[in-house]
Image (cartoon, helix red, strand yellow):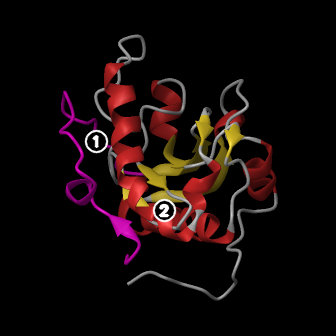
Amino acid sequence: METLVTRAEWGALPPSQQWRALPRTLGVKIHYEGREVPADLAAPDQHHRCAARVREIQAMHLADAGQGWIDIAYNAVVCPHGQVFEGRGAHRESGANGDRGLNRAHYAVCAMLGDRGLTEPGPALLDGLCDAVDWLRDQGGAGPEVAGHRDGRETDCPGEPLYRWILAGAPRPRPGLTRRA
């Protein structure tokens, strides 16, 4: 997949423990950051900031002793420019869906959207989410379900704009576009 930014490319720290293997899932749960994401991050000339933001998410997750995360909680993070940043990756249990059963049932993909600032997904971000879902289906044994985080937990995640897209069937905004290698 040409839109994939590997852990090495974005500068990921290693996990603090071994990941739990995950042979397949029912599908993918979509998340958002749930905090302010600067609106200007979506500008075409601002993509250079996205890898640092993924590193920041990983650092926040590793520092959260209450959650006990061993790494970034998501299997992938998608930036507003449509790039898919490998989080835990395929065949690895996420830490983001709520509990062990939910984390084993679905992969977790986070959109770089917030509850303030950048809240509306643009076509590039939606294409990137479709690429992430396709990647986890092709490489990770993800099933056909695409759901929101709120479909498994009482939460506002992934926000109303992104949830409307999920309820509409998570369509690729530019039908026929495939950016996979």
Q: Which residues are magenta?
A: 1-24
Q: Earlier in the sequence, mark 2 or mark 1?
A: 1
Dominant secondary structure, magenta? loop
The image position of residue 50, as x and y in percent, is 42, 54
Q: Nearer the viewer, mark 2 or mark 1?
A: 2
* Few, some or many residues within 10 Å of mark 1 (<14, 14–19, 20+): few
13, above or below 167, in the image: above
Count of picture labels: 2
In front here: 70 or 102?
70
The image position of residue 151, as x and y in percent, is 71, 37
Circle 1 residue: 21
Report the residue at 51% width, 58% height from top. 79
Which part of the image, by quadrant, shows the N terminus?
bottom left
Circle 2 residue: 46
Taking the view exactly as shown, the residue that stands out farthest to the bottom is 176
In front here: 38 or 91?
38
Q: Are marks 2 and 1 in contact (CB under 8 Å)?
A: no
* Few, some or many residues within 10 Å of mark 2 (<14, 14–19, 20+): few
Look at label 2 and name its amino acid: Gln
The image position of residue 19, as x and y in percent, is 25, 36
Q: Is 132 contained in the magenta span?
A: no
Which part of the image, by quadrant, shows the C terminus?
bottom left
Q: Is residue 46 left or right of residue 118?
A: left
Q: Is 18 contained in the magenta span?
A: yes
